[in-house]
Amino acid sequence: MLLLYLELILMVIIWSFSFVVVDIAVEFIPPLSIAFYRFVIASLSFVILDLYFKFTKRKEKNSYNKSLENNRFTKNDWVLMILASFTGISIFFLAQYSAIETIGPSLPALFVCLITPVIITILALIFFEEKLNTLKIVGFVIASIGGFLLVTGGNINILAPDSPNFLGYLFALITPLLWAVYSTATKKISKSNSSITMNKYIAYIGTIELFFFVLVNGELFNFFRNFFNISLFLSALYLGLACYVLGYYIWQNSQKILKSSKVASFLYIEPFLTLIFSLLLQRSEIIVLWNIIGGIIVLIAVLIINYK
């Protein structure tokens, strides 16, 4: 169990830094193209892994080999995977990356990490009959307060409709609902199938969706023109391999073992780490005392939620 928690911490660190990576990448190409580049890399990684284990002379049964065998996806599973590809890849990253381009990395991290655990918990109560005790409910409330203070610094006006960056806030608000739907759909699939194989097919479907989005949006020429830009390539490599192939696997695997609410609680650490990474790399962020206090509250809340 300790190893699983360490994996979740690693996942959160990887995902936290991804917001800053995207903030750097949007200086070169639009958000939609970045998402497409990311999943081209992720899909190619799965193709390479498949070819390696198909043609290699090593016959031992490792975990990846086993994940490719005995998967019986039903029609309902395929419907859920298509739903997951929209809510967890194409539309999700279009909204998230557009938000990062508009309002920077920390606020989008706040919205997806603050609101998502609450929505996931509600959906888990409906679809998986998971239960919450009083202590966990208190923890979620405390984490929500802390998360709000962490990024807004206690200033509610930055979320007002007349704010110049309101569209960015709107994109950021869409992402928690999309991620919660994705998490619920994939948890239902992974109960009887391999997480690796499921993520592979979702990546393939999502890449096709993003290709058509990029094509319709007239970004394809610009995408290929910047394909070998070293900064973009390294960003896509990080986002595709570390964030998707590794990060999504940890997320799905942990949901098989732990309650959805407990796994989702780790997302509360993400905005805190994103803010730290953003400040270290001197991105356009403003930090006040309330941000620091909010981060401390979030960390305390995560401990409460995971207390047995």
Image (tube, grey):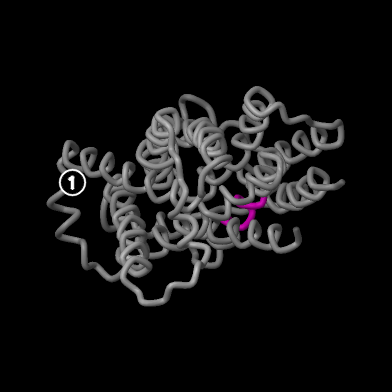
Give left or right: position of 138 versus 119: right
Tell me, yes or no, whether the highlighted magenta stretch contains residue 22. no
> Residue 160 or 187: which is nearer the viewer?
187
Provide residue 29's location: percent of width, then percent of height. 26, 53
Tell me, yes or no, whether the highlighted magenta stretch contains residue 270. yes
Seen in the picture, residue 5 relative to 132 is either above or below; the reply is: below
Give left or right: position of 97 versus 131: left
Seen in the picture, residue 251 relative to 13 is either above or below; the reply is: above
Count every numbered label the image shows and give the total: 1
Instruction: Kindly identify the residue that appears in the image at 52 percent across and 56 percent down.
Output: 247
Main SS type for the magenta part?
helix
Instruction: Kindly identify the residue that appears in the image at 29 percent across and 45 percent down.
Output: 32
Give left or right: position of 221 versus 168: left
Quarter residue 112 falls in: top right
Provide residue 225's location: percent of width, then percent of height. 15, 60
Locate the N terminus and report the quarter of the image it occupies: bottom right
